[in-house]
Image (cartoon, rainbow, N blue to C red):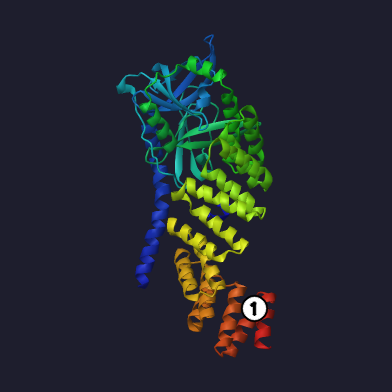
Amino acid sequence: MKAVYSARFVKNGIAFFLCGFIFALALPRTYAQDQLPDLVRRIKPSSVAIETFDARGERLSRGSGFFIDRDRVVTNRHVIDGAYRGEVHLNSGNSFQVKNVLAVDAEGDIAILKVEAPPNLVRPLSLDRASPQEGESVVVIGNPFGLEGSVTNGIVSAVRDIPGFGRIIQITAPISPGSSGSPVVNMQGQVIGVATLQITGGQSVNFAIPSERIAQLDRSAQTQTTQQMSLGELVVATSRNKHAKAVEYFRDGLSFLSKDDCEKALPYFQQATESDSSYAEAWAQTGFCHEKLGRHAEAIEASKKSVSLRPSAESYFNIGLANYYLKQYRDAEQAYRQSIKLDPYNAADAYYALGLTYRDWGQFDEEIQAYKHAIKLKPDYAAAYDRLGQRYLQSKKYPEAIEAFKQLAILKPGDAGAQNNLGEAYEAMGRRDDAVEAFRQAIRFKPDFGKAYFNLGKTLLAQGNRDAAIEQYVVLQNLDQDWAEKLYNLIYP
């Protein structure tokens, strides 16, 4: 439901402004293309090739990485899978041994390696922890088939919030074998994420894990007081850990979930839970995918298993959503309340969903309060204002409805529906001149808006302007026969 809610709103002077605006839109792309060679020259020395070897000293794999500090290199966790020794190759031609593994985020497919290289040879990259914008230009610098640097560029095609995991960045820049672990940089040369290539089920899926997750892992690495593991020790620890295989399945599922493909992601999350029945995150994603696919009973079962292992606001939300669709409103209410309790400061969507539950349950006062809570947490929540206004209108609280729809019109200034709603509230209160103007505005925004023509005709008729009402009927005859017939019945009772 989050996707549904989310919910997630003087003549020459105008010409001058528009020209400046159009120029501003065109400038970044041209500037980006002009600056790309210079950007690549600056960033390339910071990208490294990583070569790993098995217990017999034979080459195991090649990947990529980048320095985030003088002695720390970021790469993908799967780049060092099974490795007993690793080498980092700099753009300068120098090579250095991987000393230790400082930190691992298995689900996020990130590892931070300790590498002791002379400071004068190291070019650390800064992390941009802000979420990138869709359409933003990016560059990936890696080592796809050897040690030479390779450059691909593209855009951020999507930034997805995956419940229970966090954000994933979809990019159009190609990632080839050997480029896993490459830095994804914006046009300012800041790292927005680490590139990840997954080959799952015979398909290649590429995306990036955001820099904020890298920064969190780096902070944990710096605060740890225990001795770090060597690559060989990591192999031994992983082989003894049943959770490790489950994490591989989880990452495979995540690669498909990054493309909103729950049908293909679900079997991998289910395999993860079979490999490790105590894997709360895998149960959570299993429940999420079941719900996205409309399998509500299965979603409840998996999500309940998740919260029994690790209570989370996201899984309780999923339980609430599934119960709502099954019309089990009391259970939905309880689950949403648990979600709100666990994460009260990010509960706008849960309050909105709770409002819809109360609406269908017939508890209208509680519905109003739920929408108001959602708006308090998220003042630009247009959908909540819309539902709030409709409930006020149906409850004949016309002044409150008008205020809600006014806010909706501010948040959605070009939206015909917002203006039509406002007009209906004005008309219900008897403010017919205001209603007429709102309906006309709705028609300006959407010239084929049949309901707005009907409302306008109805209001004009109530004002005694029968001829003007007939004009709206004539328009509707060629536009919407159903609304035309309704207006005809009012004009000719």
Q: Position of residue 409 (x, y in %)?
A: 47, 68
Q: Quadrant of residue 396?
A: bottom right
Q: Is residue 192 visible?
A: no
Instruction: Compare residues 341 and 146 and report the one nearer the observer.
Output: 341
User: Residue at (57%, 25%) from the top-left corner?
Assistant: 243
Q: Disc 1 on helix, strand or loop?
A: helix
Q: Is residue 432 above or below residue 181?
A: below
- Neighbours of disc 1 within 10 Å: few (<14), some (14-19), many (20+): many
Q: Is residue 385 above or below residue 6?
A: below
User: Residue at (40%, 29%) from the top-left corner?
Assistant: 220
User: Residue at (48%, 51%) from the top-left corner?
Assistant: 347
Q: Is residue 425 visible?
A: yes
Instruction: Compare residues 154 and 252 and report the one nearer the observer.
Output: 252
Q: Is residue 340 above or below residue 403?
A: above
Residue flagged by tag 1: what amino acid is it? Leu
Q: Is residue 210 left or right of residue 333?
A: left
Residue at the farthest left position: 120
Instruction: Compare residues 436 and 17 and report the one nearer the observer.
Output: 436
The residue beneath circle 1 is: 476
Q: Position of residue 152 (x, y in %)?
A: 49, 35
